[in-house]
Image (cartoon, rainbow, N blue to C red):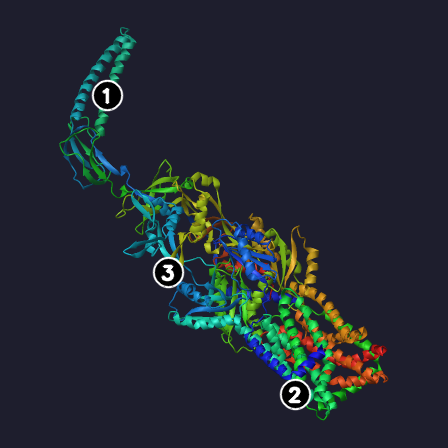
């Protein structure tokens, strides 16, 4: 079949050229249109349900909202896990699904399920979160007021009712979340003492307002052949309308709202705030819809921005703060640079080895062509161009040319050997000769990477695209090698006087004595190498492990955590102090500081004690890491009352998303009672104290939120004839300021609240709120309720229907795996868990564990697959094993490189080892095949001589494939830009592996053949 | 390792010191504060009928003259009107008759007594005569009293009497024209009592029943001004509708343009003011389910204080906290936690139990210390 392909393509040369021109055109178009992103979409399929339950406590929300929702959803098809967080004012339920389901189908299912959940009236309505992924925040902007003439309330209103709708119209935008400033509300400020005077109750006021803010349509009437529409216009138009609302008639005289309350504009209670450079501000986050191209969305936003800016009032403007695509572009640039440099280096290497322009040209042309075919396939399979998928290409750059090299080299050799023969026949035969080994070699590379596609979880999402892309590009190169290269060879190659090039001469001069040497002591060499291999395996087992190197996003960000229960105003003060401190002391490096305290109205599961501080850097920073370290230390010491945790925007979201844990390593304690869990976490913390490599154990304090508990005294209520509902209404609307109606102003709408004067100012005043029953009894709140301050839950986290508590662990200078093992031992020894309580490790470690387990299954399978392929190729198990023997040689180099550079074993490194597999086997195939061939030709010659000749003859292709791979990957090793650190372990391993595998292939494989290969004859 | 640890401790101490300077946690001394029990209630301005005095005729008669004019202010005891009274003359003539009768009874009695002594008269007759004599005498006394009540001497005959004002005030109205004949107890003149005529009727929750008492002070907020007043009466009946006590307060100073039926805000200081050891309200912090105050550690005094604790106080919790703290000495947060019980509070001060006078305490920004303590208890041996 392979021969037929070569045959056909040589017959229809022109067609082949046209075909490849079309392919490259399509490939180029695909290259332009492939969505670009920093990362593959690693976020799991997730749908979030928010239930805003204004003013309610964590415990009640858990009981009344979160739990019913969780249990209703837990039976849904495809649910992987359910995590939830219940805290003051919000229930957040996040459902993770198996990846194969369609998100719209899932959302539809969820909506239906939610409807069946019975949540008490007035406790909120569950809504599905925006259809975006965890990394959906593509663009943040500040609505900046350079004249400083507008109040925060006005800016917020502009943002909510003017800017937000405009940006929401941009294609691909799912939601625009406003954060900061104040939301306007209309306050009916009730003086409860006046209720007594006028003889009205709180409930009557609420009812009066609700029933006085209505409009109605009255159809139409016909008059003089025309239609007149009838409208009842009863919405409040101004504050006087509210004031004039009649509550009841008192002996012919109306009691109106104005008699018992003052009506004024005010600010709605808020849960979060924004401060930029020491001054409160309003920002907004644009969320991208699932499956859209971040780059396109941001581009659309930026175009819209010009329009928005033009229509905003004078002095106001949109000021971009964070643009994900900047990072994306940097990451893609890093990898593209590596790719381009790799290509150039490969070209140089080729030229040096071939020392002939035409053949080098053919090989080099195959590079971009294979890449373009890969892009075409990427587009077909909906793969985005990102750090991982592109690095797949970069890794493969050196291997792409392997097939072509073999084809061209063989054709060239034949052409030179018979300069006068028929060129067509010659090249056809040359092609046919190597077609099978080339195909097998490429298929083996593919075979190595295909099992990676079965990795699931985070590892699968990260490295799957990379593996897939390697497969794509290798298949592309196979196509090029089999179809185009013979055609190009016919057209371009010319016989030339064979004269060995200088480079090869020098190499051979060096190499020959070594080869002679090892062939003299074959057994000893093999023994030594085996020893070295086992030693290196031993060394590897000592090496630390981690899941994934941290991506450097070239930004500084902090999570700032204060004790639970911290007031928002205090957080803002802290934020502004931090901002001013940073600007004052790091003004030369930092342009601007943004703090986000608490949460936006629909979004994070954060409370006022939590802040995120994002620094905008000036472009000319020399050592970002150093600066970041210095600043962290400084901030930690200057602001001792809060905790600073350095992080980065994307990394933080990933951490948060994957485990509901905001640290790299964490222990989750599951159980029922928060107090018991808190005690256990304390014990574990003490047990772990002093563990080597343990930087810090951080208990996420779930308790510690002070609650003012208002518990009705039923006897007292009965005595005064006040119903519980009346009390709760006063608490919800009067104290809690839940809007009772809305004032509609064009498209804007603002809540109207019936607020009790002074109720939220002090505990004593709260107690003294007077309540008038419908029968006229007047009592203070504390007369009918037991009011006390008690410590309660700040939030309640649950996973799969069980409560849990998190112990965050920071490690330093020790690999996670061994630390976890030791920690587990200590915990097992000293902590007693009551029944129903247990721990689980979470964070990166869990991912690593999952990935390792999977790889432990994949690797033997891969070896088996390769063995099968080799067996098919050689038709001899012995030869197949001989080739496979090359693998350990490659691994040795990888291990040594890893140890020298002090890198932990990560998934990235493991994939590097897999790549070595492929390379080592390729080397082996080339050599073993040739020795076989030569032995067949001259069966009577001394095996040692045959091996020597064959090895010397194959020295060039072996070195060439090795060097192209090496130089192809070298740029990844030296890349410094954003994203380079992710591929660093991989490239270290591959570089080490190539070197050792090539050296050992050239020295040990002949020895191996000498010892085991001879019996075949 | 040990050396490292000690360096760590020194560093952390330095940071705390730096922190203290930087943060400027204010320290104050515990002091005594007077706590009044102030409550704010609604009151209604009323003018009780007793505040409008009516000068009445004591006895039927004809009004001969009025001695005051409408609108004239009068003082207590001032003559208001003269009344010619036939009844008065009748009283005087009756008095004359009775006096004569008394003399006759006296004589008869003396005679009967002599006869009885000699056994000629019965005991029954003697008693009979004595009764009649006494009856007449008492009738005389009664008339005398009646006259003196009206300010008329019984010695000289008179046919007219004067009525006087019972209290000071302004003559609001002369009700009966001169020369008219009136019956007894007919109002003649109405006098409105001066500034004191308005009262505030305040409603007070029942729970203050043991604290509220006549004479306690209050303040009336009227037209953005404060006016002093005092409780004059606690009405015996609870207002049934509102289930609150009703008290009356009299104003101690004149209030211009005060209107009856106005609802006004009233502040009352009820119960007896007491002195308590108190800290500023800004010192309080809610920590581990209890109210606490932070006290700066005095290292030189530390021993002494501890001793003191063992000897005198019985605040187990406090001791517990301190001991617990000693265990974590390396934390080096130079504050003790004192669990306190809130007894009373007003706008700025909180009276607490379990603290010594003049003890230094953190009087504000206690949040920072709480955060620091929480942070260290969470781990965070980060440096």
Q: Secondary structure at mark 1?
A: helix
Image coordinates for residue A520, horizontal then vertical, percent: 84, 83
Image coordinates for residue B188, horizontal then vertical, percent: 19, 34
- Residue A491 tag number: 2
Question: Would you place residue B115 above or below residue A11 in this image?
Answer: above
Pinpoint the chain carrying mark 1: B
Q: What is the spatial separation of the Cα atoms under label 3 and label 2, in whole angstroms?
A: 74 Å
Q: What is the spatial separation of the Cα atoms under label 1 and label 2, in whole angstroms?
A: 161 Å
Label 1 in the same subunit as label 2: no
| Camera-nearest residue between A440 and B252 | A440
Asked whether, in this view, residue A295 is left or right of residue A399, the answer is left
Label 3 in the same subunit as label 2: yes
Q: Secondary structure at mark 2?
A: helix
Q: Residue furthest bottom?
A: A497
Foreground tag (3 vs 2) = 2
Q: Residues within 10 Å of mark 1 (few under 14, many from 20)?
A: some
Q: What is the spatial separation of the Cα atoms under label 1 and label 3, in whole angstroms?
A: 93 Å
Q: Residues within 10 Å of mark 2 (few under 14, many from 20)?
A: few
Asked whether, in this view, residue A823 is left or right of residue A185, the answer is right
Q: Residues within 10 Å of mark 3 (few under 14, many from 20)?
A: few
Name the quadrant containing residue A648.
bottom right
Q: Say which residue appears at 40% left-offset and 72% top-offset.
A: A310
- Residue A746 tag number: 3
Is any atom of residue A175 visible in this view?
Answer: yes
- Residue identified by numbered label 1: B139
Which quadrant is home to the N terminus of chain A?
A: bottom right
Label 1 in the same subunit as label 3: no
Question: Would you place residue A508 above or below residue A796 in this image?
Answer: below
């Amino acid at each position: 079949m392979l021969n037929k392909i070569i045959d056909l393509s040589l017959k229809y040369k022109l067609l082949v050229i046209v075909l490849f021109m079309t392919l490259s055109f399509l490939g180029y178009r695909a290259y332009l249109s492939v969505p670009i992103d920093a990362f593959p979409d690693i976020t799991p399929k997730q749908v979030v349900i928010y239930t805003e339950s204004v003013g309610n406590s964590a415990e009640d929300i858990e009981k009344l909202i979160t739990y019913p929702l969780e249990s209703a959803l837990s039976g849904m098809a495809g649910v992987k896990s359910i995590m939830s967080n219940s805290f003051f004012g919000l229930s957040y339920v996040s459902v993770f699904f198996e990846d194969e389901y369609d998100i719209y189908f899932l959302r539809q299912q969820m909506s239906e399920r939610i409807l069946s959940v019975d949540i008490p009236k007035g406790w909120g309505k569950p809504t599905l979160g925006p259809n975006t992924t965890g990394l959906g925040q593509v663009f943040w902007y500040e609505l900046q007021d350079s004249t400083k003439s507008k109040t925060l309330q006005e800016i917020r209103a502009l943002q909510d009712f003017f800017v937000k709708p405009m940006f929401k119209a941009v294609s691909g935008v799912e939601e625009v979340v406003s954060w900061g400033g104040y939301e306007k509300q209309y306050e009916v400020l009730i003086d409860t003492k006046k209720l007594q005077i006028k003889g009205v109750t709180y409930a009557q006021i609420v009812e009066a307002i609700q029933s006085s803010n209505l409009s109605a349509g009255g159809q139409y009437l016909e008059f003089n052949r025309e239609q007149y529409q009838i409208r009842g216009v009863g919405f409040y138009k101004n504050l006087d309308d509210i004031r004039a609302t009649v509550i009841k008639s008192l002996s012919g005289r109306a009691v109106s709202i104005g008699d018992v309350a003052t009506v004024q504009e005010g600010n709605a209670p808020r849960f979060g705030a924004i401060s930029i450079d020491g001054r409160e501000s309003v920002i907004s986050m644009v969320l991208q819809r699932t499956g859209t191209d971040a780059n396109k969305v941001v581009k659309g936003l930026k175009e819209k921005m010009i329009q928005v800016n033009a229509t905003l009032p004078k002095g106001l403007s949109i000021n971009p703060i964070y643009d994900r695509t900047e990072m994306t572009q940097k990451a893609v640039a890093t990898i593209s640079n590596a790719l381009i440099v790799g290509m150039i280096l490969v070209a140089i290497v080729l030229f040096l080895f071939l020392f002939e322009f035409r053949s080098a040209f053919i090989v080099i042309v195959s590079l971009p062509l294979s890449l373009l075919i890969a892009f075409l396939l990427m587009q077909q399979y909906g793969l985005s161009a990102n750090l991982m998928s592109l690095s797949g290409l970069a890794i493969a750059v050196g291997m792409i040319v392997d097939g072509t090299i073999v084809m061209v080299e063989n054709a060239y050799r034949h052409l030179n050997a018979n300069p006068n023969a028929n060129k067509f026949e010659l090249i056809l035969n040359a092609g046919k000769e190597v077609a099978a080994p080339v195909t097998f070699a490429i298929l083996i590379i593919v075979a190595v990477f295909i099992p990676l596609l079965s990795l699931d979880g985070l590892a699968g999402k990260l490295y799957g695209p990379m593996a897939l892309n390697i497969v794509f590009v290798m298949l592309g190169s196979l196509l090029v090698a089999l179809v185009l290269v013979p055609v190009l060879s016919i057209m371009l190659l010319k016989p030339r006087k064979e004269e060995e090039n200088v480079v090869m001469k020098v190499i051979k001069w060096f190499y020959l004595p070594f080869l002679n040497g090892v062939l003299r002591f074959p057994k000893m060499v093999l023994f030594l190498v085996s020893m070295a291999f086992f030693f290196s395996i031993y060394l590897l087992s000592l090496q630390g492990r981690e899941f994934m190197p941290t991506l450097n996003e070239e930004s500084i960000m902090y999570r700032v955590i204060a004790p639970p229960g911290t007031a928002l105003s205090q957080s803002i003060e802290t934020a502004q102090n931090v901002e001013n401190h940073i600007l004052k002391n790091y003004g030369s490096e930092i342009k601007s500081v943004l703090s986000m305290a608490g949460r936006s109205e629909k979004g994070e599961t954060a409370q006022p004690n939590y802040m995120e501080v994002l620094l905008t850097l000036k472009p000319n920073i020399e050592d970002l890491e150093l600066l970041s370290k210095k600043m962290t230390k400084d901030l930690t010491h200057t602001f001792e009352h809060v905790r600073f945790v350095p992080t980065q925007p994307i990394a933080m979201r990933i951490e948060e998303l994957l485990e509901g844990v905001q640290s790299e390593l964490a222990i989750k304690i599951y159980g029922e009672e928060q107090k018991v869990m808190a005690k256990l976490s304390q014990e574990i913390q003490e047990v772990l104290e002093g563990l080597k490599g343990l930087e810090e154990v951080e208990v996420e304090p779930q308790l510690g939120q002070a609650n003012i508990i208002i518990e009705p005294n039923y006897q007292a209520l009965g005595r005064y004839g006040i119903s519980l509902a009346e009390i709760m209404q006063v608490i919800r609307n009067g104290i809690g300021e839940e809007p009772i109606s809305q004032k509609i102003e064009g498209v804007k709408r603002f809540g109207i609240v019936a607020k009790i004067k002074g109720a939220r100012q002090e505990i004593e005043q709260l107690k003294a709120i007077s309540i008038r029953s419908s029968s006229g009894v007047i009592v203070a709140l504390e007369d009918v309720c037991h009011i006390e301050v008690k410590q309660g839950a700040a939030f309640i986290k649950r996973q799969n229907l069980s409560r849990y508590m998190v112990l965050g662990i920071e490690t330093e200078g020790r690999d996670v795996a061994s630390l976890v093992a030791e920690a587990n031992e200590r915990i097992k020894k000293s902590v007693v868990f009551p029944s129903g309580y247990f721990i689980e490790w979470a964070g990166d470690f869990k991912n690593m564990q999952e990935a390792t387990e999977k790889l432990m299954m994949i690797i033997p399978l891969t070896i088996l697959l390769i063995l099968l392929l080799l067996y098919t190729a050689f038709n001899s198990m012995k030869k197949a094993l001989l080739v496979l023997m090359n693998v350990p040689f490659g691994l040795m180099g990888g291990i040594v490189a890893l140890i020298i550079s002090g890198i932990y074993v990560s998934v990235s490194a493991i994939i590097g080892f897999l790549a070595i597999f492929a390379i080592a086997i390729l080397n082996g195939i080339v050599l073993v095949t040739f020795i076989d061939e030569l032995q067949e030709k001259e069966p009577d010659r001394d095996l040692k001589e045959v091996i020597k000749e064959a090895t010397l003859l194959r020295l060039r292709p072996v070195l060439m494939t090795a060097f192209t791979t090496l130089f192809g990957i070298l740029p990844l090793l030296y890349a410094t830009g954003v994203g380079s650190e992710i591929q660093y372990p991989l490239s270290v391993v591959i570089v080490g592996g190539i070197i050792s595998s090539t050296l050992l292939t050239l020295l040990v494989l002949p020895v191996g053949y000498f010892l085991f290969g001879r019996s075949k004859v | 390792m040990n050396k490292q640890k000690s360096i760590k401790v020194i560093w952390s101490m330095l940071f705390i010191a730096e922190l203290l300077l930087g943060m400027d946690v204010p320290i104050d001394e515990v002091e005594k504060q007077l706590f009044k029990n102030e409550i704010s209630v609604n009151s209604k301005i009323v003018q009780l009928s007793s505040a409008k005095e009516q000068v009445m005729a004591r006895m039927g008669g004809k009004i001969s003259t009025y001695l005051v004019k409408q609108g004239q202010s009068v003082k207590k005891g001032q003559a208001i009107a003269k009344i010619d009274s036939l009844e008065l003359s009748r009283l005087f003539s009756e008095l004359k008759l009775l006096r004569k009768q008394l003399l006759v009874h006296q004589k008869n009695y003396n005679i009967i007594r002599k006869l009885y002594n000699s056994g000629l008269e019965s005991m029954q007759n003697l008693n009979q005569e004595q009764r009649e004599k006494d009856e007449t005498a008492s009738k005389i006394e009664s008339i005398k009293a009646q006259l003196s009540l009206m300010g008329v001497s019984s010695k000289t005959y008179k046919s007219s009497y004067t009525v006087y004002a019972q209290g000071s005030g302004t003559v609001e109205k002369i009700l009966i024209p001169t020369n008219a004949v009136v019956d007894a107890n007919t109002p003649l003149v109405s006098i409105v009592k001066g500034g004191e005529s308005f009262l505030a009727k305040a409603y007070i929750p029942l729970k203050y029943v043991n604290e509220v008492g006549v004479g306690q002070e209050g303040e009336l907020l009227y037209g953005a001004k404060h006016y002093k007043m005092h409780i004059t009466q606690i009405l015996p009946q609870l207002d049934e509708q509102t289930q609150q006590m009703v008290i009356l307060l009299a104003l101690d100073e004149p209030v211009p343009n005060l209107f009856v039926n106005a609802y006004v805000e009233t502040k009352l200081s009820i119960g007896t003011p007491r002195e308590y050891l108190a800290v500023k309200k800004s010192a309080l912090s809610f920590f581990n389910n209890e109210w606490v105050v932070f006290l700066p550690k005095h290292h030189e005094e530390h021993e002494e204080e501890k001793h003191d604790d063992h000897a005198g106080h019985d605040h187990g919790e406090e001791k517990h906290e301190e001991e617990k703290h000693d265990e974590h000495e390396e934390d080096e947060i130079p504050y003790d936690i004192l669990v306190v019980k809130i007894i009373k509070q007003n706008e700025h001060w909180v009276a607490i139990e379990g603290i010594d006078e003049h003890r230094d305490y953190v009087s504000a920004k206690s949040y920072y210390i709480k955060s620091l303590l929480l942070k260290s208890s969470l781990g965070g041996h980060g440096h």
